Image: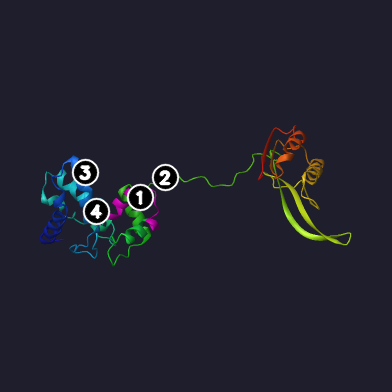
Amino acid sequence: MDELKKQKIGLFRFRVIASLIGLRKEEWGEKEKILQDISSKQWEIPYTGRSYIGRSTVLDWLRMYQESGEKLESLYPCQRSDRGGSRSMDEETQRMLINLKKELGAASVPTLLRVARERRLLPADFKASRQSVYRLFKRSGVEEELPRKDRRRFEAELPNDLWQSDCMHGPKVEVEGKLRKTFLFAFIDDHSRIIPHAQFYLRENLESFLDCFWRALEKRVLPRKLYVDYTEKNQMPKLMRFFFPIREIALKTSA
């Protein structure tokens, strides 16, 4: 880039930050108002297809100007070097994306680009790939994301450590000439996924549940823990007496 273009860009950046220069700390409210006005205004930015300037970019220009001892040359664009850089983005766009990444933190690249477009910070002809943006963040040291939450399914450590039980409504069957609704009670070993016992019953009550559990015990040994999704809250005392040998019992009720 020749010197004339650098001067033109530097003067434009100075014009943008001019109203912020010299503001004291106690004038923070006024500073925020000016920043809002600048970022919401449409500009004719030299040698770029963009027409809006992000708040973080304005603060970046102001910082560079102040740290240089208020030298206009500090607002000149850096000498471009394609080695290790991006050929698909100009310096201003790169700086804007880096500042936006710092602002949004762990936001993914697709989300960041969407926000940049919504704020009209990208040039109209922006065509850089996501991979180019990833590489830009890596070079700039802002690629780190917050630790991802472990979303792996919980699983008991050993067989028979934990049984889970549930009941679901089944089909209607004919019993003594009448259609009766059925209910499927079942127990499953959380680690091995073995089903010790499952059976259809004509009633959804404690007696059916306990019968199914007893038949499961006849096939397998007593589990260390049991998760019970059961709705009859008033039957809990009886249920607890039946299960007293089990070390841990989780009883979930909806009543």
Residue 165 within the magenta-colored segment of the rendering: no
Name which residue type carries label 3: Trp
Which of pointers 4 and 3 lies earlier in the amino acid sequence?
Answer: 3
x, y (%) of residue 34? 20, 52
Asked if residue 106 is among those painted magenta in the image, a careful observer would answer yes
Q: Reading the chain from its start, which is encountered first: label 4 or label 2?
A: 4
- The residue indicated by pointer 3 is 28
Residue 37 vs residue 215, the one in the foreground: 37
Is the C-beta separation of discs 1 and 4 under 8 Å? no
Q: Which image quarter is the N terminus in?
A: bottom left
Tag 1 secondary structure: helix
Q: Would residue 152 appear left or right of 204 to someone viewing this image?
A: left
Callout 4 amino acid: Gln
Q: Is residue 81 visible?
A: no
Q: CA distance from mark 1 to mark 2?
A: 11 Å
* Prevailing SS of the magenta stretch: helix
Earlier in the chain: of badge 3 and badge 2, it is 3
Report x, y in % for residue 171: 77, 60
Circle 3: is it few (<14), some (14-19), or many (20+) Cα within 10 Å?
Answer: few
* Residue placed under numbered mark 1 in the picture: 104
